[in-house]
Image (cartoon, helix red, strand yellow):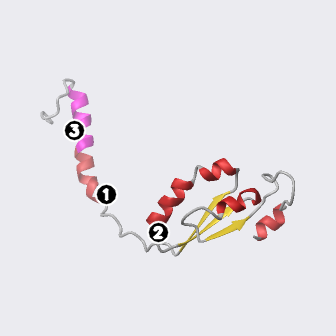
Amino acid sequence: MFSHLQLVNRRERLIVGLADLGLRVAAPILIRAPKPSPAPPASILLLRLERMGDLLMTLDAVAAVRALAPLATIDLVVGRWNGDLAQLVPGIDRVEILSPSWLARGGAREGYSRLARR
């Protein structure tokens, strides 16, 4: 039985053969045809609250998002310290400023309650 398997040990050959047979039966049930992809999103929110270098390192990712959803409105949320730079990022429709207290260094800070409301 299961002589097509190149396993010397008869017990191992039987176990592997039965597992293979079970997977052949179960595969059509377990592996379904792919679902049609959903409609592209109308809007996308990107968050990048850290420092300038972190924002610069995401430029390729922002471009990839824009390429995948060319018609979507893309909003980018950044900290106050990155606001001016974020305005220059290609592919972004709107920049929103958010300065959570745990990231802000001096200046205006937003507390947890204001952050939650926004």
Q: Circle 2 is placed at which residue position?
A: 69
Q: Nearer the viewer, mark 3 or mark 1?
A: 1
Instruction: Identify residue type, mark 3.
Output: Gly
Image coords of residue 118 (percent x, y): 75, 70
Could you tell whether 66 is left or right of 107 in the image?
Answer: left
Q: Nearer the viewer, mark 3 or mark 2?
A: 2
- Residue drawn at (24%, 43%), measured in percent from left and top? 20
Q: Looking at the rendering, in which quadrant would you find the N terminus?
A: top left
Q: Nearer the viewer, residue 41 or 97?
A: 97
Q: Do callouts 1 and 2 mark residues in contact (Cβ within 8 Å)? A: no
As drawn, the residue found furthest toward the right would be 107
Which region is colored magenta?
Answer: 10-20
Q: Earlier in the sequence, mark 1 or mark 2?
A: 1
In three-dimensional space, the C-alpha distance between marks 1 and 2, rounded to whole angstroms, equals: 28 Å
Instruction: Identify residue type, mark 1.
Output: Ile
Q: Earlier in the sequence, mark 3 or mark 1?
A: 3
Instruction: Identify residue type, mark 2.
Output: Ala
User: Looking at the magenta stretch, what is its main secondary structure?
Assistant: helix
In three-dimensional space, the C-alpha distance between marks 3 and 1, rounded to whole angstroms, equals: 20 Å
Q: Residues within 10 Å of mark 3 (few under 14, many from 20)?
A: some
Q: Earlier in the sequence, mark 3 or mark 2?
A: 3
Q: Circle 3 is placed at which residue position?
A: 17
Instruction: Please check the rendered image and state whether residue 4 is part of the magenta-colored stretch, yes or no.
Output: no
Instruction: Please check the rendered image and state whether residue 19 is part of the magenta-colored stretch, yes or no.
Output: yes
- Residue drawn at (28%, 53%), measured in percent from left and top? 26
Q: Nearer the viewer, residue 31 or 58?
A: 58
Local secondary structure at mark 3: helix
Local secondary structure at mark 2: loop
Image coords of residue 91 (percent x, y): 54, 66
Residue 31 disc label: 1
- Residue drawn at (21%, 31%), measured in percent from left and top? 13
